[in-house]
Structures are given as C-alpha cells and as structure tokens.
Image (cartoon, rainbow, N blue to C red):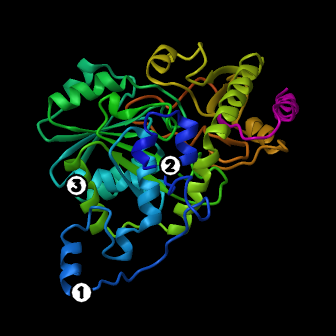
Amino acid sequence: MSDDDHKGQHFATRLSHGGRAGTRIHGFVNPPVHRGSTVLYPSCEARRDAGARRFEQFMTYGTQGGPTHYAFEDMIAEIEGGTRAMIYGTGLAAVAVPLLAFLKAGEHCLMPDSAYGPARAVAEGLMTGFGIETTFYDPLIGAASLAALMRPNTKVLYLESPGSHTFEVQDVPALAEVAHARGAKVLMDNTWGIHHFQPFTKGVDVSIQALTKYVGGHSDLLLGSATVNNDADWQRLRSASSQLGQYASPDDVWLAMRGLRTMNVRLKHQEQAGLEVARWFEGRPEVLRVLHPALPSHPQHALWKRDFSGACSLFGVVFQPRYTIEQLFAAIDSLKLFGIGASWGGYESLALPTTGFITRNATSPDLGGPTARFHIGLEDIRDLIADLEAALSRLG
C-alpha cells in the first residue's frame, strides 16, 4: 500500500500506516534508519542521470537525504495537505530558509508583530544584512490595512497564527488573498496548528513547523519542516536548502517518525487537558484573562472555530495587574510538576514567564498584567491543578 492509498483514511490511521512498506510483507514493522554520506553508482552514466534529478527524492549525496528522510517528508506533506516537504535540523532553520528562498536584496517582507522571537531576529539581523527590509504589522490587521502596507517590492507576507506568547488568531484567508493579488508569497508558521489547521486550503504557499514539538513529542530531538503545494515552490525551496547546506540527521528523523505514530493520541489528550486547565485558570481570582483561542472568551474565538479543527495544549495567562513580576516568578518557582523551559510540545508540562520577553514595535507588549505561558503535558490533570493551586496561593 503506497502513501497515496492512505489519503482517504482518517488521521490516526494515516499516522500508523504512512511511511511504511505495508502490512503484507516479511520484515520489521518500522522502516530502518539509513545513514550515509557517499552514494555509489554502478556507472558514470547512472551518476550523471541521478545528478539531473537530484531534487526528486533520488540519492546523489548524503546532504540530499535518503530513504529515511523521504518517507518522513512524504508523511509531513500529507499531514499538512501539501505535495512536498523539506526537513531541517531545527525549527528555526525551517523559518530562515524559506524566508531566504523567497526574498532577495531590495525586496520587502511583512511579518506580524507577534511572530516567534527567533524569526523576528532573522528578519532584523540576517535579512537586514542581506538588504531585505521587514515591516512588522499588527497581527489583527484587516485586509484593507494590510493592502496599504504592501509595496511593489513586497514579496513575502509572513503569518503566525496563533501568535507566539500572545495567541492572536489571524484571518489567514483574507490576508493571503491580499498578498496574492499583489504577487507576494504567503509563508506561515503553523506549529501551533499542527494538523488542526490545513494551510493550503486557506491560501498559504509555504507552511512551516517546528517538528521538535508534538511530532517528536518526547523533548529529545530538534527538527523543522517547510511544506509546499506546487512544483515551482518546491524547486525554489529545495534549491535554497541545498545551497545553504541544510540537512537533518537521519537518526532524529527516525525518532520523529516514531513520534508521529502516537501523536494523534497524545494530541487529543493534551488538547483536552490544556482546555481543562485553561478553564480552571479562568475561574481563578488571581487571573485577569486566559489567552487560549479555543475558549469562547478569546477575542478571535470565532476565527479559530472557523479555520481550526482543534487546538494544542499551549496557552497564555495574564495575571491581575496588582501582582509584580517578582511575585509571578516566586509562584512559578514553587511549582513541582511544571518545568521552566521554552520548547513546548513534549510529554512534560511547562510554565514560562513571558513579561519582559515580548518584543513589539507595531503593537503594545502590555497585556494588562504579568503574563506566563503554560504547556500541559501528559501528567494527571488532578495533580497539575493541585500544583497550580498551591503556587497561586503564594500570590496572596
């Protein structure tokens, strides 16, 4: 059974059977790890022919990937509803390479003010040095206001929905329509959406994910992906990736493929657990508001409900303004089951203060009180809430 044969099946089935040789075979259920740098050919003519097809999942050199990469790329592309995916050694590489692939000196990029901090750093650092200008815009901008920001040399509209730390949900179809009408490509960080947001049905050209998170699932690997939906975009992305020497370890790719097999079960549990904890926070007197798009109280809940089929377990909490950041630090420090760390999406719960770590120049970073971001893992919800209750009691 080929991967194409699974496309009509449900998500959990596709995760279990994709990237495998099939069920009616003799051999191990999991595909092996293929490691290597040198690729040998039976003749000079065969090597010449392979070189002409080096972006077509045909091994020419170790940096072009191998069977382990190809199987995983096909699975990621299929999950996102695209045709081809490129795997990178980190999520940040999956952000930087597409930006550099679709922009050149003298061109202009539009990026939401809520973008992932390292993505912002690429725009303000490397891209500036390459002569590429970036304008940061309000993530809640409407189509008409976005059109006013577009220039003749605007070649990329970058989206991130929901926004990093502040969880604004963007109207992706409306914004993508404006960009395409003016000849710009639409790149989107879809890490929070995973498979709940189908980017290519909403006007996205390149969908970016940090596979480090739910795909890996066990906080032990670094990977990223960029998925496209046509051959022209694939050739441009693949060429830039090759020229920049981007390559992902086959061992990490194999681990991520293993993570994919159980991701559906983990996601369902963590989605419900995240919502339960978020609702618990909403009922606490110490809390001003909860930043979770799946809650009816979220300002863009209607957009989330229209465009997403589910949610992940990452959300923000804004505490009452009477508390200081030092009080919030003390409360988080007292947590026993929540680690203090940034890379969410694993099996473990995390708490991270975000006040003072939010950079904005088009919108205000002030959310009304000290803020923290929470990721809910696979622990028992009763234990997590008991831990949080004890921590919040320290706020007074």
In three-dimensional space, the C-alpha distance between marks 2 and 1, rounded to whole angstroms, equals 33 Å
Residue 386 visible in image: yes
Check the image and name the residue furthest to the left.
Answer: 152
Which quadrant does the C terminus fall into?
top right
Which three-letter amino acid code belongs to the residue tagged 3?
Arg
Q: Earlier in the sequence, mark 2 or mark 1?
A: 2
Q: Quadrant of residue 270?
A: top right
Residue 158 pos. (x, y %): 33, 39
Q: Earlier in the sequence, mark 2 or mark 3?
A: 2
Say which residue label 3 marks.
236
Say which residue label 1 marks.
43
Say which residue label 2 marks.
18
In three-dimensional space, the C-alpha distance between marks 3 and 1, rounded to whole angstroms, equals 29 Å
Task: Judge by depth and name the residue closer to the eye, 190 or 298.
Answer: 190
Is the C-beta separation of discs 2 and 3 under 8 Å? no
50 with respect to 351 (left or right)? left
Give the main secondary structure, helix, strand or loop, of the magenta stretch: helix
Instruction: Please tell me which residue is depicted at 77% across the width and 36% down the height of the picture.
Output: 327
Asked if the stretch drawn in magenta spans residue 391, the answer is yes
Q: Quadrant of residue 395?
A: top right
Which three-letter amino acid code belongs to the residue tagged 1?
Ser
Callout 3: few (<14), some (14-19), or many (20+) C-alpha neighbours within 10 Å?
few
